[in-house]
Amino acid sequence: MKDKEIEKLIKEEEKRQKSVINLIASENYVSDDVLKTLGSKLTNKYAEGYPGKRYYGGNKVIDKIENLCIKRALKAFKLSPEAWHVNVQPLSGSPANLAVYLALVPPGGPASAPRLRQGFDGQEGYGGQSKIMGMSLAHGGHLTHGHFVSASGKFWTQVPYGVDKETEVLNYKKIKELAIKEKPAIIVAGFTAYPRIIDFKKFREIADACGAYLMVDMSHFAGLVAGGVYPSPFVYADVVTTTIHKTLRGPRSAMIFSKIDEREIYKKIDKAVFPGLQGGPHMNQIAAVAVALKEAVSPAFKKYAKQVVKNAKVLAEELKKYGWRIISGGTDSHLILVDVWMDGKGITGSEAGDKLEKAGIIVNKNAIPFDTRKPFDPSGIRLGTAGETTRGAKEKDMKKIAGRINKILRT
Ligand code: DSN
């Protein structure tokens, strides 16, 4: 490289990545093919529009790439092109979710009088009149599921649902009652910090009971769905969004799947992505998504997905044995939420994150449901096994990692 300054920093980061144990639940390590595709000359091309309908010339090859990516996306999740449409252009998860809301939930103008809302995290804010029902950020949901600091909570108003205090898992009966009372236009099922399997059938019943669309944001568990170790949301959802770079192990990017039926929501969603929100798609990224999707249907990826969950279960059990409190008592996925504060008997999430990082283990501090501490220094840490499993970690390695974590946190 001619730019020695950036080259040095890339090398520094590569060295850092190699030298740590990475338990960030949303990160992974892509293949050399994905990296090569990201760095290809495809980045030079403008391709506003969709295959066969572009606003620029010279897109014959680009059309083939986008169509191949679409084909592979449907194949990876066992979907027929007659039943499901997929848009592979979203630049990342947040714009993908925003595009769905723009398409399906007319904001209805600003709230007639500023509305004061009391979310699960005790925050206040204002939103438009139409409602998005999503898991509260404080209970494991994502900002883009309606939280007021995100556009999803500024143009719309969130109806937050959460977990039960006792079990720390979703209470579908309560969610249904809330949905019927609040009548949201869309219900979002999905998480960034909820370790359990979501019952998509129950969410379908809830959406039907209040006439809402059901959107599943499977960003965290997409790779587990592709690998057959987490239930597929496609049986019940109207729309499924996902990032590619978490358990699915591809480049930073996103996709939106929409069910094809007489409502023709896919047409509205395509328009919301382009020209509604985005300009030219990042074709190097889309080609890299195609590469990752081909990898995701391989027998090796199935084995990988299985191992990710096995590793997470072992890590959770071992930490439990050492006396740490695991939210909901365990995990069904790649993700574990650990209460390290334990009502003052342990240490704070920030302290835990810092101590672990100093010792070469990377995690993120995270709020736990009904946290008594503030979001910037919460009671928990979030761990995930997708990255270390890519690097070959097995159950025995998880036992060692749990031992190291325990030792570091207790000294
Ligand atoms: N930042 C992602 C995560 O860590 O879960 C979600 O956007």
Image (cartoon, grey):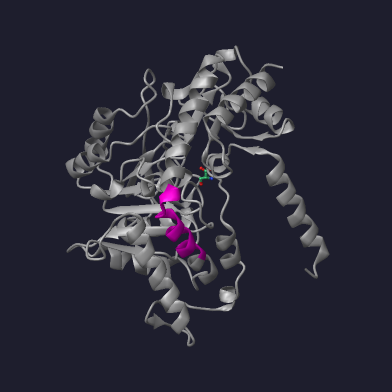
Residue 147 at least partly seen: no
User: How many numbered circles are shown?
Assistant: 0
Residue occupying the point 68% across, 46% down: 17
Percent of width and height locating residue 312: 48, 31
Q: Position of residue 132 (x, y in %)?
A: 34, 46
Judged left or right of residue 204, residue 7 is right
Measured from the top left, where is residue 12 in percent x and y? 77, 51
Using the image as rendered, state which of residue 111 and residue 59 is in the foreground.
59
Task: Give the vertical position of 289 relative to 128 (above or below).
Answer: below
Q: Residue furthest front?
A: 299
Magenta region: 288-301
For the point 30% across and 27% down, the residue is: 171
Give whichever of 177, 261 is nearer the camera.
261
Q: Is residue 256 visible?
A: yes
Question: In what quadrant of the picture does the C terminus appear?
Answer: top right
| Majority SS type along the magenta span | helix
Q: Residue at x 37, y 81 (%)?
A: 52
The residue positioned 43% from the left and 24% from the top of the image is 330
Quarter of the figure with residue 31? bottom right
Of all residues, the one furthest to the bottom in this rendering is 57
Nearest to the observer: residue 233 or residue 172: 233
The x, y position of residue 133, in whole percent, is 33, 42
243 versus 82 height, above or below: above
Tell me: 187 left or right of 18: left
Magenta stretch: residue 131 in it?
no
Q: Quadrant of the N terminus?
A: bottom right
Q: Is residue 295 magenta?
A: yes
